[in-house]
Amino acid sequence: MPADSDPRQPALRRPRPARPWLLYLLFALGAALLLGRPASNGARIPYSDLKAKIAAGQVASVQIARDKIVATPKAGAAKERWIANRVDDPELVPLLDRQHVTYSELPESDWLSGLVVAWLIPLALLSLVYFFFMRRFSPGAGVMSIGRSRARLVAEEGTGVTFSDVAGVDEAVDELREIVDFLKSPERFRRIGGRIPKGVLLLGPPGTGKTLLARAVAGEAKVPFFSLTGSDFVEMFVGVGAARVRDLFAQAQAKAPCIIFIDELDAIGKARGASTFAGHDEREQTLNQLLSEMDGFDARKGLIIMAATNRPEILDSALLRPGRFDRQVLVDRPDVRGREEILRLHARGVKFAEDIDLRRVAALTPGFAGAELANVINEAALLAARRRKDLVEMADLNEAVERVVAGLEKKNRRMNEREKEIVAHHEAGHALLAEVLPTTDRVHKVSMIPRGLGALGFTMQVPLEDRYLMSRTELIDKITVLMGGRAAELLVFGDFSTGARDDLERATDLARRMVTEFGMSEALGARSLSSEGARTGALLPGFPLPTERPWSERTQQTVDSEISSLLARCFDRARAALEENRDHLVALAARLREKEVLEGPELREVLQGAHAPGEEAPRAEPQVRH
Ligand code: ADP
Ligand code: MG
Ligand code: ZN
């Protein structure tokens, strides 16, 4: 029996995931068999030569494969076997019979390489992919390590940071002390039956110490600290973010009292439904999971959810409802005194010359957040070291301030005088309208300190109550407030800036929904033309085919013109109202320019005597009853 007709069949079992070496073994075996097959060894000769050798009686036996013939020479005829390509030759078998050559079929000569190509390689590739994912998803490594392993699900046992590491944000610290008390002895709170905090949202510009404060709360209370960043939840795999949230809460509940801290909450907490692209489903799922976990857990055990954001205005309002992040702590940029304290704090451990005056540095750095102040001290120490000095001198500090300022200017965080003037009037426009229009929320705070990317300043309104229904008048007032910034710019400067981009986006969205979803346009009446309806016929969710709109082109044109005219009327209304209160607008802008931030009461003091626009809301006739 020829050697190669008895191949040791490699077991074609599915390799077990736990044993990748099995796979490599299979590979090696296959390769060895393939390369070392004796049948392949021999002298390649033309078929005609082979035939001649058979006819000459030099051949003892022949194996015929599909594509080749392997001939074993008679003893003494040759040392090597002969291999020829097979030719479809009806004379071959009679010839072999005549010469009494034994012939047999060579078992599929390439069955092994066929096996390797058709089975083992794809199998190996699949297994590799499988291993890759198993490794990432395996419970040992934790679901949290998918993607980059940024998420630390392991709780820090006490962060070691305390309130003494934080300065210049005394109000925020005072508010957080209560949380520390609660975490220290949840039973006491439970006994008294006081309102137990559940979610605390830290809001404020970047670098003001929000992350630091959250860690300090955990450090003060000496409880475990689970910290994650919003973007850790947003993965390309649908469902992973939601699974992480579930996992996080399960682990944290087992460790209570403890803190879950979600940094940069806006990454998951962006308002839902703003975009219909399928890619946002993942974020929505994650957000929904977070909301339901927050509703579900028992706060009395002493689990506190803290979160931080510098863009509260884009958060989904569901996050701010009672029982969720209903406690909001403002972490603002520090004032002069606060800046001095922060400088002192970071100056600990740095050797300074006698002449150092941190108060002066504080006076030089209005608008700096804690992180920037820490940076100033650090830069000064570096500069002194570079100059081979033993002590940091005032000159180093001054230069460090300049460097940090230059860095900030490069980052476009500081405005020139004219820009400041425009922003002050823009924000004053929003704030004034929000105050004088009858149905709008009161202004909590207005600021012209830049934050976020799109907005130059911000006006923060607090809803008077949780709203489920809004009337047409209220919606129109809302759009009018959004238009207030742009209208004020036009009124005062006769020109527009790009600062109203975000406002326009939100106003347009509201107007579109009024026309297409709420049936609040006269021309179209009580009819729903929402894109939701149009989407039902689409192939992919989120990609409606234009032809699938169940309404006519003319209706579409009406929709467009209704949206435009609604926006135009709201803009005119905003401008008229501001014009009527022009003195108040200018006074408010001036005060804002001077103080940069105005709280509600102070703002209302400046606006005393400002009045609602004399005109009626455009088309006051409501189309729907509610
Ligand atoms: P945020 O989370 O608000 O963006 P961080 O907490 O990350 O800011 O602050 C970054 C760093 O800046 C901190 O680690 C700390 O060194 C410094 N810092 C910021 N704010 C303060 C503050 N109020 N007091 C002391 N240091 C601060
Ligand atoms: Mg932070
Ligand atoms: Zn605006």
Image (cartoon, grey):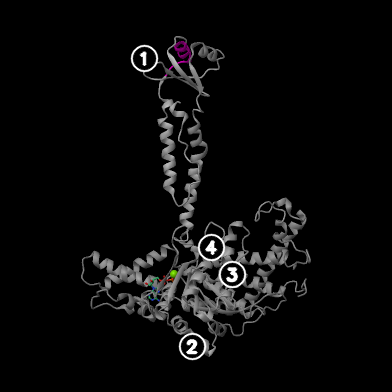
Mark 4 residue's CB less than 8 Å from ligand 2: no
The secondary structure making up most of the magenta span is helix
The three-letter code of the residue at mark 1 reads Gly
Q: Which residue is mark 2?
A: 188
Q: Earlier in the sequence, mark 1 or mark 4?
A: 1
Magenta span: 44-54
Of mark 3 and mark 2, the one earlier in the sequence is 2
For residue 492, say whether it is visible: no
Q: Alpha-carbon distance for marks 2 and 1? A: 103 Å
Mark 4 or 3: in front is: 4
Closer to the camera in the image, 92 or 339: 92
Q: Confirm or deny contact between disc 1 and disc 4 (CB under 8 A).
A: no
Viewed as shown, does residue 619 lie left or right of 385? right
Residue at disc 4, secondary structure: helix
Indicate whether residue 53 is drawn in magenta.
yes
Q: Residue at 75%, 59% (x, y): give it.
A: 558
Instruction: Categorize mark 1 by other alpha carbons within 10 Å: few (<14), some (14-19), many (20+).
Output: few
Which element type, helix, strand or loop, lies under badge 2? helix
- Going by the numbered disc 2, the residue's amino acid type is Arg
In the rendered structure, find residue 76 and report the number of the disc placed on it.
Answer: 1
- Does the magenta-highlighted stretch encompass residue 209? no
Whether label 2 touches label 1, CB < 8 Å:
no
Mark 3 and mark 1: Cα distance apart in space: 91 Å
Mark 3 or mark 1, which is nearer to you? 1
- The alpha-carbon separation of the residues under discs 1 and 4 comes to 75 Å
Identify the residue position indicated by label 3 in the image.
316
Q: Which residue is disc 4 drawn over? A: 241
